Image (spheres, grey):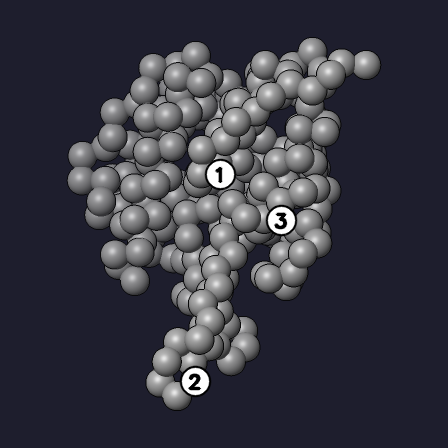
């Protein structure tokens, strides 16, 4: 589990420090020394304090100098409340065909900071960015959900984008079936999270679609093409 935790921390830091800042007009952020170990040093280096702010302190924190606070402030400037939001049910059947959300925001549903921001902005880019910060904070404290068996041969495993569902069938000592459903599968399915979010992105902000996709974070190359205008 320690290896999994380090992999998830690495994925979050690559997105937050290296890939996302240039999309927001910011310089890449230096990785804190000893980031692999997590711990207080990682939190202070990125949040400017030992943990994320509470809902009442978010505005003051995001206006401050902490490295990740600048990312939050930039996303607030790019997306107004109600823009690029979705209203999908949380995933309950991992191998179902109906659109559902399987994201870090779903995995951390009920977190006070996410609940407050969702109430003010809607379930959009700011919630998804903060969900990554919430997950990073938890991982730095070695707190994350263990793999969970939900049926015979079926398990849910935490990953850096949400939950990965694995299904394995064995007959006579031979694997006869292996299936995997990832957060990206849910994100990109017809009517899924990306499509629902793009549907509420104003047409005059269509140029923000690549930024939105980076925040939602599919783990596969993605080509976005503008459709015909009305």
Q: Residue at x 35, y 85 (%)?
A: 173
Pinpoint residue 199: horizontal percent, then vertical percent: 72, 29
**In the figure, is residue 138 to the left or right of 84?**
left
Give the mark count. Answer: 3
Rounded to the nearest angstrom, the CA distance separating label 1 from label 3 is 13 Å
Pinpoint residue 210: horizontal percent, then vertical percent: 53, 22
The mark closer to the camera, 1 or 2, is 2
Considering the numbered disc 2 on the image, is that residue within a helix, a strand or a loop?
strand
- Labels 1 & 2 near each other (Cβ < 8 A): no
Q: Earlier in the sequence, mark 2 or mark 3?
A: 3
Can you say whether 2 is above or below 69 in the image? Answer: below
Q: Earlier in the sequence, mark 1 or mark 3?
A: 3
Q: Is residue 158 visible?
A: yes
Q: Is residue 48 visible?
A: no
Considering the numbered disc 3 on the image, is that residue within a helix, a strand or a loop?
loop
Which residue sits furthest bottom? 172
Rounded to the nearest angstrom, the CA distance separating label 2 from label 3 is 33 Å
**In the figure, is residue 15 to the left or right of 111?**
left
Considering the numbered disc 1 on the image, is that residue within a helix, a strand or a loop?
loop
Nearest the eye: 26 or 48: 26
Name the residue beneath numbered marker 1: 218
Q: Residue at x 69, y 11 (%)?
A: 204
The mark closer to the camera, 1 or 3, is 1
Q: Residue at x 25, y 56 (%)?
A: 3
Question: Which image quarter: residue 202?
Answer: top right
The mark closer to the camera, 2 or 3, is 2
Name the residue beneath numbered marker 3: 101
Q: Residues within 10 Å of mark 1 (few under 14, many from 20)?
A: some
Question: Which image quarter: residue 69?
Answer: top left
Name the residue beneath numbered marker 2: 171
Which residue sits furthest left? 34
């Amino acid at each position: 589990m320690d290896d999994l935790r380090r992999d998830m921390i690495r994925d979050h830091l690559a997105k937050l420090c290296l890939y996302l800042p240039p999309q927001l007009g910011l310089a890449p952020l230096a990785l804190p020394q000893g980031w692999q170990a997590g711990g207080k040093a990682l939190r202070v280096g990125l949040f400017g304090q030992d943990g994320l702010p509470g809902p009442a302190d978010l505005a003051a924190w995001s206006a401050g100098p902490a490295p990740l606070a600048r990312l939050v402030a930039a996303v607030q400037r790019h997306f107004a409340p109600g823009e690029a939001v979705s209203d999908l049910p949380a995933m309950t059947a991992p191998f179902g065909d109906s659109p559902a959300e399987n994201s870090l925001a779903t995995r951390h549903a009920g977190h006070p900071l996410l609940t407050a921001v969702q109430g003010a902005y809607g379930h959009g880019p700011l919630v998804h960015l903060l969900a990554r910060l919430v997950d990073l904070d938890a991982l730095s404290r070695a707190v994350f959900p263990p793999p969970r068996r939900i049926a015979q041969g079926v398990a849910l495993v935490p990953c850096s984008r949400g939950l990965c569902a694995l299904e394995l069938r064995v007959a006579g000592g031979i694997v006869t079936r292996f299936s995997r459903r990832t957060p990206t599968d849910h994100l990109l399915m017809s009517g899924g999270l990306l499509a629902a979010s793009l549907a509420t992105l104003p047409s005059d902000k269509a140029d923000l679609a690549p930024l939105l996709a980076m925040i939602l974070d599919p783990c596969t190359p993605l080509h976005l093409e503008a459709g015909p205008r009305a």
